[in-house]
Amino acid sequence: MIHLLLVIIYIAFISLGLPDGLLGSAWPSMYGEFGVPVSYAGIVTMIISGGTILSALFSERLIKKLGTGAVTAISVGMTAAALWGFSASREFYHLCIWAIPYGIGAGSVDAALNNFVALHYKSRHMSWLHCFWGVGCSCGPYVMSYFLTNGMKWNKGYFAIFILQIILTAVIVLSLPLWKKKSAEKHSENSQSAQPLGLRKTIAISGAKEIMITFFCYCAIEQTVGLWAVSYMVFEKGISAETAAGWGMVFFLGITVGRFLSGIITEKFNDKQMVRVGIAVLLVGIVTMVLPVGNFGTAAGLFLIGFGCAPIYPCLIHSTPIRFGEAQSQAIIGVEMASAYVGSTFMPPLFGIIAENLSISFLPVYSAILLVLMFCMHEKLCRKA
């Protein structure tokens, strides 16, 4: 029965990724209908990100009170309700209202699931679960594309994902006894009964600031490269827009393949070693993109950046209970998630300002600076831990 719970968690990670790519794939069909500029997509994503950051910061208190299974069910249910709200929206402000539960649900479930897996399962499952998140991210735009290319409106795409989320919510509710049984195996209910640390005490823990900056830098790199790599290939490398658009998927392919392979080799290497290897490969990828190695070399560099990113995020999360103790892991993972969302929300637009006012050629330099800071913080964390 415990294996059944693991299957449910894998499905939940796919569910986490499903809504993430919907707005980007649907927005070209949406903004004209709402009568707003194309740039207004940024308003919706900022509201979602704000809700995600806040819910991640307060996730510890909620999880200690209700338990991981209940918080996961409630959060997925909130996300499902928000997806229905998007499908039914007729005015732009409707989207903004529904973006609030959309973000709150995403942040809570992310922090809850990551800590639960870090406590109860081996590192390979953490890597594979985040690989499945990537599968969800890929499937969401595909579902939306299916409806749009078959003459239906974007609302149908959102409604289809809403149905999937409702089904998952029901499955999680039915599986709540399995969550409690798994928690009881490691006596983690004792830690759940303790008082929540709160944000101030959590940040004061030795190593907390270093891990927060590490997550901030990682997600800043991942999201900035994911957003701007195609533009870099077009405007800096002279690759045609059509070719560059196809090669843009190479980065995400590198992350997906890398996380699958990471799950295999984590049996031989610990989390700290996996993070260091990921940083080294990431650096090689950044250097390769800069070198005059032709179009294929640029694509290879982009793949290596994604491949290097692959083990860093899941291995950092999985090592949290070991570094900070099981009793404090939920609080730490909450601030890790919040820091990650801050990095992914604000750093890509910051590079957009740099690209517009200076040059897009600074993308590798920008990424390298963040990488060096991430490496320094991780090594400082390792010395403290």
Image (cartoon, grey):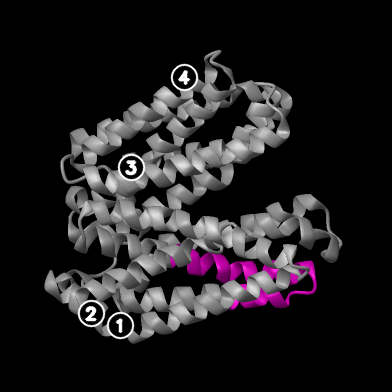
Q: Residue furthest front?
A: 150
- Mark sitting earlier along the chain (3/4): 4
- Mark sitting earlier along the chain (3/1): 1
Secondary element at tag 2:
helix
Secondary element at tag 4:
helix
Which residue lies under the disc numbered 2? 180
- Circles 3 and 4: CB atoms closer than 8 Å: no
- Mark sitting earlier along the chain (4/1): 1
How far apart are the two marked residues, 4 and 2, measured between alpha carbons? 48 Å
- Tag 4: residue type? Val
- Tag 3: residue type? Pro
Which residue lies under the disc numbered 1? 176
- Tag 1: residue type? Leu
How far apart are the two marked residues, 3 and 4, measured between alpha carbons? 19 Å
Residue 344, position as x, y percentages in the image: 52, 45
Which residue lies under the disc numbered 3? 311
Q: Which mark is residue 299?
A: none
Which residue lies under the disc numbered 4? 287
> Which of pointers 4 and 1 indicates the residue nearer the eye?
4
Bounds of the magenta segment: 81-108
Q: Residue at x 25, y 52 (%)?
A: 124
